[in-house]
Image (spheres, rainbow, N blue to C red):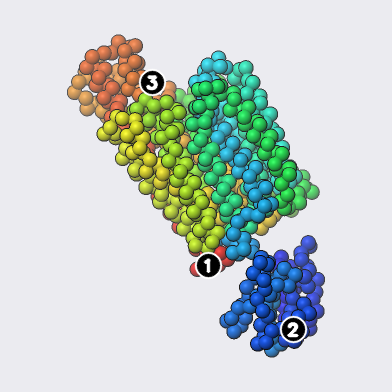
Amino acid sequence: MGGECRSPAGPGAVPFRGGRVGRTEQSGGVPPRAACTLVREGHGVTGRAPAPGGFEPPPDPGVPAAHAVRKRTGRWAERETTGRSVRRLSGSEAAGRSVRRLTGARRAGGRAGDAGAAGPGSGDRALLVPLALQNFLMTYNATAMNVALSAVVRDLHTSLTGVQSAISLYGLVVAAFLITGSKLGARHGYRRTFVLGAEIFVLGTLVTAVAPSLVFLLVGWSLLQGVGVALMIPAVLSLLTHASSGASRTKAFSAVGTAGGMGAAAGPILSGVITSYASWRVSFILGAVITGTVVLLLRRARAPEPPPVCDRRFDVPGAVLSAVGCGLLVIATLLAGRYGLFEARQDFEVLGRTLLPRGGLSPVVVLAGLGLLVLVAFAGWELRVVRRGKDPVVRVSVLRDRTIRTGSAAQAMQFLVPVGALFLVPVFLQTTLGLDALWSGLVLLPTAGGLLVAASLAAKAIAGGRMRHRTAQMWSFLCMLAGCLVIGALFVPREQNALVIGLAFAPGLFLIGLGQGLATTTADLIQSVPPEREVSDVTGLSRSGSYLGSSLGVALAGAFLTTALVHSFEAETEKSSVLTARQKQLVVKTLEEQVHVTAASDSKVRAKLRSQGVTGDAADEIVRINVRAREQALTFAVAGMAVLAVGGHLVTRRLPRVRARGGRPE
């Protein structure tokens, strides 16, 4: 009798001859004798005589470990042997045939698993709940500060520019340390890294809650919370990757992504209520309590985790290069609204010296170019570290895999497009209709509804093998495209009633939410591809790309808005038959000298004109020009987001055509 037995570990498969089973070559692998059972006619291993006709009777349907296995004849037989599946072969069929243990883990592009893995078990849920809760809090925390800006400025006796600088620095710190945070998790354990990040986050939250001045806000919010988030985000994905597989993993990633989306949607509303009826400090105190609860829940959860690997020196130069490169890109995106994308709208000064004059090259281009150069140098350094047999911060070679490379690019675009589009809607609501931040947040609620619906349906469809990851990602961008087009049509309002316009926005916002919900399955696609030793590399790269995509979404939307606003205002002013030549020159000069051009409400424009002594027909004409320019600028900006959605759709078409289960090409 001859045959071949493979260990369920895959690479540890060993042949056997004459019924002898060799030892597995893979350390820690399951012994082949325990994984495979050979059944010959008349010699059942379990001590039971085989059924007539060469088939064993079907097992008890209550035994979940029994798997269906197909005979050569095309019929099916099931057998339960110490909880493992076996293929029963007759003596004549056994010669030269393989006996393989069926496993639920599949290579993705849809590694969706067996039907038995339809949902997360109790161990998975014990881990999933605290991770989803913390992801909700982190996204809520990032959006809540925007609503509380005026209250923070008043309480800390500082300026709006100072608080906005704190928010910008927070984003810079997170982006700079994401790759390093992922590597620290691989070296010291993801659970330990998450807990450390949570403790730093709690400390920063408490410092922010009691901050008496802007300096404490910078230390607590920008630095400590930023570092904590950078440590926790990679740990969340890596813990879920190692703790679940197949359909369970798909649903887990979808649940965590949905929680993050709900946090972003709830941020403006909850923060507005808390700030209005209590204090903005209460939000941070509650955040500290929730994070402490998450740490306690995580300590009690029992889930598998790979052993930490820190037997070699940490790659400090690589960590510095990645932080500097990502930091320069974030700074470039933050300056886009002030200086313009390509042409500098004002002098760029450092320490009193003008480095880039007005009308020349924008500092955005210079800083972004420097950031890309540093990241290229970082990639070269990491390849050199690998060639020398040392431990890199990230193995950039993982990007050679088309699923990882294309999936990460698509994920970055899935953050960029909706973040940019949803940035423009409150601008319209607050400048055109005069709504406050709380009511603007209520108008955005349909986005959360669409996200919940699509995330749940997509996760179930992919887990059940009824949809491919590629299909979900393609439809994600199509929904975002449709939502942008619907919203763009409403930026030229025919009604001034806030309730009517709010309801009119609902379909477009719901479509964007559907796109975001479908996008929650992208992490499952990316994280299911790499082997265990490369999970931290893929996590660091993909999450850094997502965060940069989110920052770039706001920057591009603001840059599109500002550029179109300036051109529209100047064009409408030149065409005006009411304004005199001197008044036109004054308007254009005032516009050019503005430090930060943004959409303004009609009441603010009229108040500004009144303070400069402009009244009567001239004031009415300038207000009319402002309305027209604002509408055109908002429409142009959301159209830009729609074009980017088309680009994202084209990117997803490059994803491999794989089945949702089994990962085999079509």
Is 399 in front, or is 543? Answer: 543
Nearer the viewer's eye, disc 2 or disc 1?
Answer: 2
Q: Amino acid at mark 2?
A: Ala
Rendered image: mark on residue 585: none
Residue 237 screen position, x and y as percent: 63, 48
Quarter placement of the N terminus: bottom right
Residue 561 visible in the shown view: yes
Q: How many marks?
A: 3
The residues bearing labels 2 and 1 have C-alpha atoms spaced at a distance of 41 Å
Q: Amino acid at mark 1?
A: Pro
Q: Is residue 610 left or right of residue 160?
A: left
Residue 171 screen position, x and y as percent: 57, 33
How many neighbours does mark 2 have within 10 angstroms: few (below 14), some (14-19), or many (20 or more)?
A: few
Q: Is residue 435 left or right of residue 243?
A: left
Give the structural element (helix, strand or loop) at label 3: loop
The reply to whether discs 2 and 3 touch (Cβ–Cβ < 8 Å) is no
Q: Is residue 338 left or right of residue 152?
A: left
Q: Residue at x 59, y 23 (%)?
A: 281
Residue wearing tag 1: 665
How many neighbours does mark 1 have within 10 angstroms: few (below 14), some (14-19), or many (20 or more)?
A: few
Residue wearing tag 3: 593
Nearer the viewer's eye, disc 1 or disc 3?
Answer: 1
